Amino acid sequence: MSIVYAQNTDFRKAGTMVADHTNTQADALATRAQNHATLVSALHKGRHADAFDAERRSLELSLERMLYDRVANAPVPFDGECGIEAVLAKIAELWQGCAQEWSDGHLVGLVAKRAVGGTTVNVSISVGAGGQLVCTAGPTLRIAELKDALDEFDRAIHVAASRLGCDYALAAEGYNPYASSPLDVSLVPCTKWTLLSAQLSQTGRYARDAMRCSYATQISLDYGNERDAITAYRTAVALTPLFMFLTDNVRSFRGCDARRCPRMVRATIWQEVDPARCGIVPGTFDEDFSFERYVSWLEGLLPVLYSDGSGTTISTGKRTLAEFMEGQVLTQRDALQFYDIAFPFVRLGSRIELLQADALHPRLAMGYAAFVKGLFCNGLALDATRDLIGIVSEDDVQEAIRELRLRGWDALVYGQRTGELVDKLIRIARSGLEDIGERRMLGELATLWEVRMVPRDAFVQQEIKARRGW
């Protein structure tokens, strides 16, 4: 009897263990489902989600630029008595009351409201992995306010550098022209950049170039309900090859001169950072593409890192986002944080983010912002743009990129010559802008396109003239 009793006791223990394991699994799946709902909910809470029309679609501009020393003719490092962190500290003194963002004991960002042009605009400064100085302005309905905010940032940089006794300037190019190798550029000493660099360096041959040497002009758009968001999102993805080509602003890639520098360098390196999280989100042009499908794609990625409410950054290891979400309940702040782990052509989050334009001189950046506004912030113009492009697939978008990289203005894009298609888009954008000043801003960049040039061509011309002694 004692033997039988002992066996029964073991069975009861085993049954308890199985039950506990089942309950643990059930709890994990329930937490994951709750977090999935939170991620989807974050998209539904985009700007103007309840009452929306295209004319009320505001914009946010982020421009990444290099801070360089005119005397040393070299980029300014992050640390040191006169480094980027010291410049930020001086700006914090100028912008009294601004919020300061710290990471691992380093000042890496400022957030402020600045009075410009008779109104108040949000302006933030952050530092990228390779020391990119990023100014983000908006959201606002008026591009003039974005320009005023960017001017305010530039003045602050100038004053801060002067108080440090330095002669610094800001340069806008798509790739660091001083770097013969991405390893020439040091990572900003923050845990998140160290973790991200270690992970991405295993997945793509240009990960270091993208993180340390790449500079972008990013436009973010408000959206309304899910249907509006998906319509605008698809259109933005379809236009991405043209945005890449038309803003191409790289004169040197890993030390080569402008004449030998290939087209669309920045676009190339960002496509090969990590195939899983870059490029086109699978199913973008399917009829049933939705917030749910975007989130499901996102959950299959490795988040790499997670920052908690106290600002502490930890590694998430080799767990996918879906697996990580089984361990804790996410807040809305967490949800928005995880949208930033992906780098597709166009990203969803609190706004629709167009990521693929090269860094441009502020004058041309305003022209690009006006171009985007004209196409997306007027209902009739957006419809005309969609009709012009027609029905496209993921393969069509990739083929457009290959064509533009190979043939430039002579490429066939969605069945039309590049120049003819761009001319039509310029006309649509102009019709979508009611403000004369915004049309003038568009003209600053469109004038270049109309003579079949992109920003990088100015570098080529300068180099040819220098070589010929003109």
Image (tube, rainbow, N blue to C red):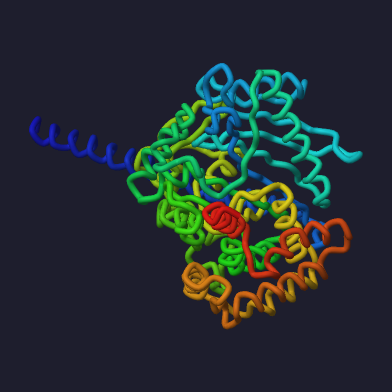
Q: Residue at x 77, y 60 (%)?
A: 442
In terms of depth relative to the viewer, which is nearer, 411 or 112? 411
In this view, the residue in front, 288 or 9, is: 288
Instruction: Give the total of numbered labels.
Output: 0
Q: From the viewer's perspective, is residue 111 above or below residue 82?
A: below
Residue at 56 percent across and 16 percent down: it is 81
- Determine whether 74 is above or below 433 in the image: above
Q: Quadrant of residue 238?
A: bottom right
The spot of residue 162 in percent (x, y) is 70, 22
Q: Residue at 54% of width from left, 28% of height from top? A: 72
Q: On the rendered image, what quadrant is the C terminus found in?
A: bottom right
Compared to residue 340, the image places residue 103 above or below, namely above
Horizontally, residue 277 falls left or right of residue 204, namely: right
Residue 69 seen by the camera: yes
| Residue with the most extreme bottom position | 415
Question: Residue at (63%, 48%) from the top-left corner?
Answer: 42
- Compared to residue 94, the image places residue 35 above or below, namely below
Farthest top residue in view: 81
Q: Kindly tell me whether residue 26 is visible in this rendering.
A: no
Query: Would you say 8 lies left or right of 454 here?
Result: left
